[in-house]
Amino acid sequence: MSTQPLKIAIVGGGMVGEHFLRDFRHNPALSMTGVVTRSAARQQELTDRFQVPGFSTLKELLAAEVPDVVCVVNANHDHRDATLQALEAGCHVYLEKPMAPTLDECREIVEAEAKSSGSVQVGFEYIHGSMTSRLKDLVKEGYFGEVQWLSVLDSRGHWWAQSPHGKLSDIWKLDRKRGGGIIYHCGIHQLDLIRHYAGNITEIQAFRPPQNPLSFYPEDVPANVTLMLKTEQDVVINFQVMHDRAATWYREKNYKPDYQHAPGHEFNISVIGTRGSCDMRIYDEELHLFQLDQDRKENRFDRTEQFKPNPPDRSHHDMTGLLDRFLESVAAGQGALDDVAGAYETMRAAATAEAALTRPGEWLSVSDFG
């Protein structure tokens, strides 16, 4: 294990890149070699605030000094190029989800990692949360017996955080080419959880309202989606994403609720197997467990596991925690915590789901994609 500080570079000067710079700057185990952003003004701002060199391209940064780890947190459609450059230079890569907008680009990343001395950790942090990983352990231990059915509900406020008088073109999350669509941006973590709980997804069927209840959403980005999924183990899953129920508070000065306790916001997962079941209320930080007593023909309440008080986002969305563990692994002479091929399987499921939204009610096979 090296005693020298781990050299880190960040590609992307947006919110996530700034968040990582803020976390890294006081860590003596890390040395920041630079941040990449196209905007000269933004480069100067980040340099002044965090005392880190700014570069216009990753190529320029690599020419100055090759880091141990490159954090690729720029726009989705720029993920591929930055990741391939970093891998070619022998760097490890933390790659924010989604891997890339197309499966061809995702496959290039998988193939490049196989040829590189570096590794790729995709930012699917949900499976590493305190609650979500606990559920994975219970499945693995056989608490539920043979898993038969899953239900996932994700309800949150809509994506138009900017001025209501702004332009649709400024809302990149509502642009399929930049944001990838509601499943790519908002449901992909849940698909990754489903894959870990129930096996690889094989078939997907999608449903959406005939028109968007949120009329300012473009037609090709539905605000309410229901997916039915099947896995290799014949588990049946219902997954719903809702942007059109919960209140938004982006612009209301007098309404600033804690996201986890905002009315209408829910993130719940249920599992039913041949021996047990659960009702996991992630925002409530409670996991309710039940046993199916076949002999007595009863469903018995077993226990509630409490996960509060938790540090913010530790229950499921601990992006910084995943990155810290990845950096520790690299410093110890190892690499990614999760196989990039598994992340590619999640991307295949997401691409299938997005395609299914254009063919409502039709079962699509994941094997036909990528």
Image (cartoon, rainbow, N blue to C red):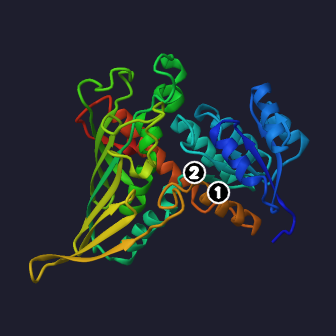
Under mark 1, the amino acid is: Leu
Q: Residues within 10 Å of mark 2 (few under 14, many from 20)?
A: many
Q: Quadrant of the N terminus?
A: bottom right
Does 216 appear above or below 28? above
In primary-sequence order, the first of circles 2 and 1 is: 2
Residue 186 screen position, x and y as percent: 44, 41
Compared across the picture, whether 212 is left or right of 135 comes to left
- 250 shown above or below 114: above
Left-right relation of 96 to 203: right
State yes or no: discs 2 and 1 in contact (Cβ < 8 Å): yes
Seen at 37% across and 33% down, the residue is 355
Residue occupying image coordinates x 31% and y 47% = 203
Dot 1: element: helix
Q: Is residue 184 something one can see in this rendering? A: yes
Find residue 323 and name its label.
1
For the image, the number of numbered tags is 2
Provide residue 159's location: percent of width, then percent of height.
Answer: 45, 32
Residue type, numbered disc 2: Gly
Residue under label 2, please give it.
123
Where residue 238 appears, as percent x and y from the top left, is 27, 50
Residue 369 visible to the viewer: no
Question: What is the distance, in whole Å, between disc 2 and disc 1 at their CAs?
Answer: 8 Å
